[in-house]
Image (cartoon, rainbow, N blue to C red):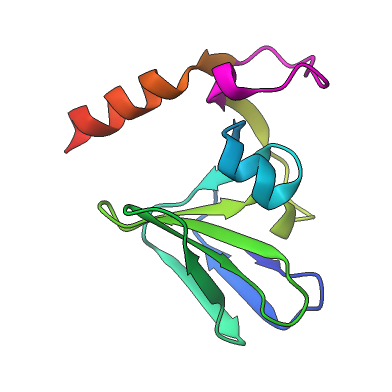
Amino acid sequence: MKGKCLCGSIEVVADDHGEINLCHCTMCRRWTSGPMFAVHCGSNVSFNGLEPTSYQSSDWAVRGFCGKCGTHLFYHLLPSDEYILSAGLFQDHDFELLTELFIDEKPDFYALANETQKITGQEVFDRFSSDS
């Protein structure tokens, strides 16, 4: 699948995916001003055009964005080399929302009607530590 940032300076290419997850953690909400709609793409991701600007937001992850228009591009999980891409990059792609992460950090001012699996922050970290 192919997507691009708002100004078109960066094209993102990844294997086709039909599922997205939603992250309600405080960092994603601060970064996106809402939950992050995320496509888990593994390590087979390429960026064409401008080089993404990056910010290491934790010991285990780097967040990337377009330095020209500011579009959020990715959350790169360093231990597994997994790219988690912003679903908004892929405007012509149909997705199914499956999971809400950090549901315990979701503020009360919004709610989704979708039936999803809901996972707390502790459950996310427990899964992450069991994968290593």
Residue located 73% across and 42% down the image: 94
Apparent side of residue 123 relative to residue 120 in the rendered image (left or right): left
- Which segment is the magenta one? 100-116
Name above or below for residue 13 compared with residue 92.
below
Image coordinates for residue 70, horizontal then vertical, percent? 73, 70
Apparent side of residue 101 relative to residue 89 in the rendered image (left or right): left
Task: Verify whether residue 105 appears in magenta.
Answer: yes
Task: Verify whether residue 66 appears in magenta.
Answer: no
Q: Nearer the viewer, residue 58 or 10?
A: 58
Residue located 62% across and 87% down the image: 49
User: Does residue 19 appear anywhere in the picture?
Assistant: no
Q: Nearer the viewer, residue 63 or 97?
A: 63
Image quadrant for the N terminus? Answer: bottom right
User: Does residue 67 appear anywhere in the picture?
Assistant: yes
What is the total number of numbered labels drawn onto the structure image? 0
Residue located 61% across and 63% down the image: 73
Image coordinates for residue 44, horizontal then vertical, percent? 39, 63
Residue located 79% across and 14% down the image: 113
Apparent side of residue 13 relative to residue 107 in the rendered image (left or right): left
**Residue 124, quarter of picture:** top left
**Residue 90, quarter of picture:** bottom right
Of helix, strand and loop, which mostly describes the magenta segment?
Answer: loop
Image coordinates for residue 5, horizontal then vertical, percent? 73, 70
Image quadrant for the C terminus? Answer: top left
Image coordinates for residue 14, horizontal then vertical, percent? 51, 62
